[in-house]
Amino acid sequence: MMDRRDFLRMGAGAALGLTGTAQSTEPTPRIRRLVRLGRTELHISDISFGSSSSSDPRLVHHALERGINYFDTAESYRWGNSEEAIGEALRGRRDQVMIASKSKAGARDTRAEMMRALEGSLRRLRTDYVDVYFNHAVNDVRRMRNQEWWEFTELARRQGKIRFRGMSGHGSRLVECLDYAIDQDLVDVILVAYNFAQDPDFYDRLRHSFHFVDLQPGLPRVLEKAKDKDVGVLAMKTLMGARLNDMRPYERPGATFAQAAFRWALASPHVDGVLISMTGKAEIDEYVGGSGEPQVSREDLYLLGVYAQLQAAKYCQHGCGVCESSCPEDVPIAEVLRTRMYEVDYRDHVLARADYANLGAGAAACLSCRHQACLGACTQIGVIRSGQQVVPVIHFVHAGAQHLGDGHGLRAAGLANATAMLAILGRLKLGVDAHQIQILATDLWLP
Ligand code: SF4
Ligand code: SF4
């Protein structure tokens, strides 16, 4: 049996007899397969353009030249600049492409507010309609229960502003939200975080190296239900953190980790297509190279296995949320760790800050937490037999609060410090009241 050290030490050459680097000398890559997106009957590129980390029309052009025909954006990406870039690049070519956008319709939002959000997106996209319009990042079933969302989408459909409706999500209550949306027939398309490391089959095939604990058993079931109802299924976050540079020593031309991860997702009977954030022309070419018949080779499996070995102990699985009940301060640990992933793994500070800001207090409580109840609460999958490594939750939430918090963390630290100062001043009987101390402490700790 190979242990972790042997597995990694062997490297690609020893394990598979491969040589060379990842610089491709192959012909210009192009999309080689269109997939049917469920009942929408849209036929989209199997690997499609995600824009959460870019707002450059030249990238959109490049993707179009490579055969990508489905462009996904959201009103929140780059504060609308992502929609602007897609609108500018696709001007005059609207009939050649499909466009999807999203907004976060809340549990109490009215249809008028939702319509304003949609019309803002249409303006920035310079189009009269979007092909799919998603309720974005849903992790609270009340957002889908809101009758206004249903009525808004019906009206927008009748007015020709949207063709199909969808729901996207990657949170710990994703399965509950999907169950509701599919059962109530509220969606034509779903966009969900789904990668090889969430697929029980992946670990079945690597049993010699991994011990598997299924943290999201409901996801394959709900995706199967979506397929039964002919709801289109798009997978995102397929690269499990996308630490592509870590994998370069193991790759060769035409056989990269990213391509293997796409093939894995596309080979799943639950998935129609893959969306991936595209931030450079060379990256687009590499990604498009994964298009085609989704057959997972032995070499693909090797690359996925190496990646999982390298990253499992640092990667918080989307939709897991198992450790969150350990925190008495209700810190949304998995959400904070997702924003940390944007910062550290994607190196996308803008996206990380924007998403962290949406978490309210975020991980502010962590900076003054004494009990550290989340210590050891991660039961991460992919636990490697030899090491039993798990995600170091405390370290990661602290880092999130320190680097992404906009005064939240400092404010919490300031107030905690105020309490300590109050106790000291109380003992010294200086007669300063708590409110004054809090103001003083906050001024001292906030920049
Ligand atoms: S450090 Fe404390 S506040 Fe932060 S997640 Fe852990 S238990 Fe919760
Ligand atoms: S840190 Fe571990 S237990 Fe917590 S949500 Fe992430 S993978 Fe799950």
Image: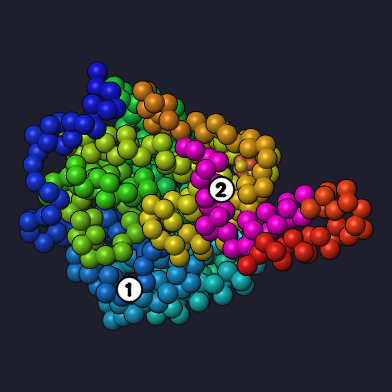
Q: Which mark is residue 398?
A: 2
Extreme residue toward the top, this view: 1
Give the quarter of the figure containing the N terminus.
top left
Taking the spot 72% from the left edge, 66% from the top edge, the residue there is 443
Magenta span contains residue 364: no
Residue 288 vs residue 426, the one in the foreground: 426
> Residue 42, how many percent across, how many down?
32, 59
Q: Quadrant of residue 204?
A: top left
Q: Nearer the viewer, mark 2 or mark 1?
A: 2
**Residue visible at 67% across and 37% down in the picture:** 371
The image quarter in which residue 228 lies: top left
* Percent x, y of residue 314: 42, 40
What's the amino acid at mark 1?
A: Asp
Element type at mark 2: helix
Q: Position of residue 81 (x, y in %)?
A: 42, 74
Q: Nearer the viewer, residue 304 or 99?
A: 304
Left or right: residue 215 versus residue 95 is right
Question: What's the amino acid at mark 2?
Answer: His
Q: Is disc 2's CB within 8 Å of ligand 1?
A: yes
Identify the mark nearer the N-term, 2 or 1.
1
The residue wearing badge 1 is 56
